[in-house]
């Protein structure tokens, strides 16, 4: 391609993004954009009808995704993306519903919703950008902050235990669980593709640099330094026991696909149960 | 020693917290109040306060932590804004119903949807029937002074009612101001030791908090709660007076600015009152006899006092930084108009909604309002009871 053509050529993600909203708000070196790239790549590869894909976000830096994707999308309130997605899916079971939000949103203030949607095996995909803090509000300690890491509300280090997201998801009933870092671009894409094709409750955790707050406050350098950390310290262990996946400060990052199993979804169960009770009188929902 | 410090609104609250050092502080981050919590976290980490500092997983949990700690007998506080206060809603009523003198700094911010992080009073006005005392601040100094007084008012034995202090998002919370920070020891003495009445930690007296209360006694208990806030006015007055004697800045229920010979009046709370004062000064220079009344205490509402101050006006404009969709005017307006009802001689009262989502209100906007008031005073006719300031039509 000639240089002029390159300059003329369109962004490969153009069809998936609301270009009038670009430039985005994310800091240089932030990993959220990388995850969005993986997501659009997975959408492309999955050949899904984009009119049938909806994205739901909560509030946060990651929550901005809902505003950038050129899909039906909803920017809900902080913590409520999952129940909103539940409602969306149930009102229109034809939709592929994706929740794209931050660790604080899904596992802090919205944690209760996560475990209940997983328990019911709601047919939704959760992409959680885990940057180890509440970034949007300035880097406060979150339910995912590794022990000893600094945060604005834990200036000399966090002393609380953090959630291990895959362990929580599996225990609550999720049927697809994977963890990657934003360095694992192609793996994230593949995981999203797999999960999009699979009915049931899926969680894909993507550990992502927050350069401006988490990295700076912990003097971990810039985005590249964090990617280097991911490169050095991540090990792919597909099928690893989710009980062993705790993350320590700057410690080993076990990544991979940990859960991929079959289980009837909420709607499957509802239809089966109601048919058992009402017999022919029952009209199956969403089929 | 009393010193001058350059602080923004959030820092002034944190400074007061450091001096008072409550037993438990529980809060969840939200713009624009986050810096209060962050500064407190830093004080805690630096060993400057001894109180417990908790980061719960939501505002609902933060207020629940406050309620638990206050029931145990602690002096407790939180800080939040907007959606955070909205999420606390259920627990606000519990705090008031259980007569727990919890203190909250609320950095006033608009409510979603659409999402907006800037200042208006929708959050606290939405909580106006929750049973909390509500005090509003014009600037950083008032936020500091009000916050200190809030403890004395809330904890008074006749009152025992949770109290919130409002300061406008960004306009106050993020504006630096030179403020008088009083001596640590003198502030501590002014606030005094907290003596809880029924602490759960007193194991010699066993009792339960919050049990079910049906048709038999619920009504009486609610009445008892209402009496708490009804007992507040003399306490608010006394504390404001004592504060003045100690620190040279006395407080009442509202501030009157150039009201002596005024014929028309603008009523506006919080930061916009500062801008309004400039407008009044300019209008006075033009020969207009106009004044400002700036409410400070919104709950309990000082109905008689405000009515007395306004009854001789020809026309009054009440400006609300919040709307009450479907109601006959916004909250401050309905209270004031209602308070004037029993007076044979009373002014025409109109309502303007301004500044939603942080929309600016400037001197020229107050002048537009004043012009309208002039017209009403001149003709005795009101064309529109309810309208907006600085809004695109
Ligand atoms: C009820 C409520 N409380 C607090 C907030 C303030 N708030 C907005 S985003 C956010 C944190 C977001 O953290 P996370 O979900 O991890 O997303 P990130 O910014 O890290 O991508 C908070 C606390 C809010 N919007 N609503
Ligand atoms: S604050 Fe952190 S998470 Fe938010 S955009 Fe910047 S780098 Fe990304
Ligand atoms: Mg986060």
Image: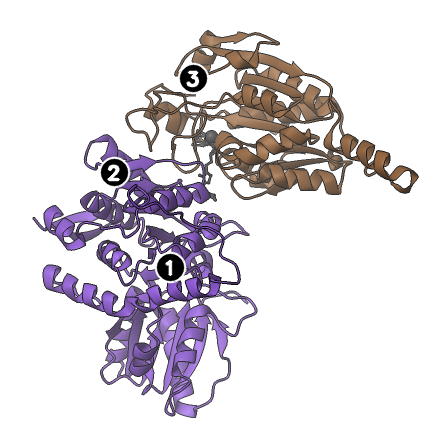
Going 39% across and 52% down the picture, which residue do you hit? B95
Colour-to-chain, brown: A
Q: Position of residue A249 (x, y in %)?
A: 39, 16
Both on one chain, marks 3 and 2? no
**Where's the C terminus of chain B, which quadrant?**
bottom right
Q: Is residue B361 above or below residue B211?
A: below
Verify CB contact (< 8 Å) between mark 1 and mark 2. Answer: no
Q: Can residue A6 be seen at all in this image of the molecule?
A: no
What's the CA distance linking mark 1 and mark 2? 23 Å
Question: Chain B appears what colour?
Answer: purple
Work out which residue is located at the far left of the displayed protein and give it: B1
User: Which corner quadrant of the image does residue A73 belong to?
Assistant: top right
Where is residue B66 shown, x and y percent of the image? Answer: 36, 44
Disc 2 on helix, strand or loop? loop
Mark 2 Cβ and ligand 1 under 8 Å apart: no
Q: Which residue is depicted at the point 82% across and 39% down?
A: A285
In the picture, the disc for residue A80 is none
- Does the rendering let one see residue B211? yes
Which of pointers 1 and 2 lies earlier in the amino acid sequence? Answer: 2
Q: Which of label 1 and label 3 is nearer to you?
A: 1
Location of mark 1 (residue): B132
Query: Which residue position is annotated with label 2?
Result: B51
Q: Is residue B300 left or right of residue B189?
A: right
Q: Secondary structure at mark 1?
A: loop
Relative side of A147 to A240, left or right: left
Mark 1 within 8 Å of ligand 1, using the beta carbon = no
Q: Nearer the viewer, residue A76 or B93?
A: B93
Q: Residue B359 at what x, y percent from top left?
A: 43, 59
Q: Chain of mark 1?
A: B
């Amino acid at each position: 391609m000639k240089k002029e053509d390159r300059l003329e050529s369109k962004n490969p993600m153009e069809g998936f993004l609301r270009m009038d909203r670009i430039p985005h708000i994310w800091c240089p070196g932030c990993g959220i954009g990388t995850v969005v790239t993986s997501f659009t790549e997975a959408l492309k590869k999955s050949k899904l009808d984009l009119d049938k894909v909806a994205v739901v976000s909560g509030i946060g830096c990651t929550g901005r995704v809902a505003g950038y994707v050129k899909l039906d999308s909803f920017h809900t309130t902080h913590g409520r993306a999952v129940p909103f997605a539940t409602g969306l899916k149930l009102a229109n079971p034809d939709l592929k519903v994706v929740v794209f939000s931050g660790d604080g949103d899904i596992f802090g203030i919205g944690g209760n919703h996560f475990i209940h949607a997983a328990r019911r095996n709601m047919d939704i995909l959760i992409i959680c950008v885990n940057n180890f803090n509440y970034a949007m509000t300035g880097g406060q300690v979150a339910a995912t902050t590794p022990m000893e890491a600094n945060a604005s509300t834990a200036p000399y280090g966090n002393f609380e235990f953090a959630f291990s997201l895959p362990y929580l998801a599996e225990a609550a009933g999720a049927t697809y669980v994977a963890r990657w870092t934003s360095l694992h671009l192609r793996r994230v894409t593949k995981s999203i593709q797999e999960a999009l094709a699979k009915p049931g409750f899926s969680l894909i955790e993507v550990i992502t640099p927050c350069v401006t707050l988490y990295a700076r406050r912990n003097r971990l350098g810039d985005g590249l330094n964090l990617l280097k950390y991911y490169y050095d310290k991540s090990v792919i262990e597909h099928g690893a026991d989710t009980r062993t996946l705790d993350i320590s400060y700057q410690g080993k990052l076990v990544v991979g696909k940990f859960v991929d199993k079959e289980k009837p979804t909420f709607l499957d169960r509802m239809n089966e149960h109601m048919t058992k009770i009402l017999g022919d009188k029952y009209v199956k929902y969403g089929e | 020693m009393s010193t001058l410090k350059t602080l923004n609104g959030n820092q002034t609250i944190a400074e007061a917290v450091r001096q008072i050092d409550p037993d438990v502080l529980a809060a969840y981050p939200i713009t624009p109040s986050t810096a209060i919590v962050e500064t407190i976290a830093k004080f805690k980490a630096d060993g400057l306060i001894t109180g417990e500092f908790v980061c719960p997983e939501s505002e609902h949990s933060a207020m629940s932590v406050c309620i638990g700690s206050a029931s145990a007998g602690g002096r407790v506080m939180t800080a939040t804004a907007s959606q955070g206060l909205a999420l606390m809603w259920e627990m606000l009523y519990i705090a008031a119903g259980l007569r727990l003198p919890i203190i909250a700094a609320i950095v006033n911010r608009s409510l979603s949807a659409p999402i907006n992080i800037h200042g208006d009073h929708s959050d606290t006005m939405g909580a106006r029937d929750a049973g909390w005392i509500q005090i509003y601040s014009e600037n950083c100094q008032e936020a500091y002074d009000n916050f200190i007084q809030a403890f004395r008012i809330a904890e008074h034995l006749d009152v025992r009612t949770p109290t919130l202090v409002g300061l406008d998002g960004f306009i106050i919370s993020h504006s630096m101001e030179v403020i008088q920070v009083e001596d640590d020891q003198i502030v501590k003495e002014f606030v005094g030791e907290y003596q809880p009445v029924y602490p759960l930690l007193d194991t010699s007296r066993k009792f339960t908090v919050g049990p079910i209360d049906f048709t038999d006694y619920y009504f009486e208990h609610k009445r008892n709660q209402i009496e708490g806030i009804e007992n507040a006015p003399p306490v608010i007055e006394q504390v404001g007076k004592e504060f003045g004697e100690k620190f040279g800045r006395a407080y009442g229920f509202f501030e009157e600015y150039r009201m002596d010979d005024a014929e028309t009046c603008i009523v506006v709370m919080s930061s916009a009152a500062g801008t309004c004062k400039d407008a009044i000064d300019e209008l006075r220079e033009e020969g207009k006899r106009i004044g400002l009344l700036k409410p400070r205490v919104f709950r309990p509402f000082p109905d008689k006092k405000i009515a007395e101050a306004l009854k001789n006006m020809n026309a009054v404009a009440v400006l609300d930084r919040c709307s009450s969709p479907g109601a006959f005017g916004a909250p401050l307006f309905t209270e004031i108009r209602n308070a004037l009802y029993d007076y044979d001689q009373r002014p025409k009262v109109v309502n303007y909604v301004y500044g939603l989502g942080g929309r600016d209100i400037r001197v020229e906007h107050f002048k537009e309002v004043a012009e309208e008031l002039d017209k009403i005073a001149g003709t005795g006719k009101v064309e529109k009871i309810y309208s907006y300031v600085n809004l695109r039509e």
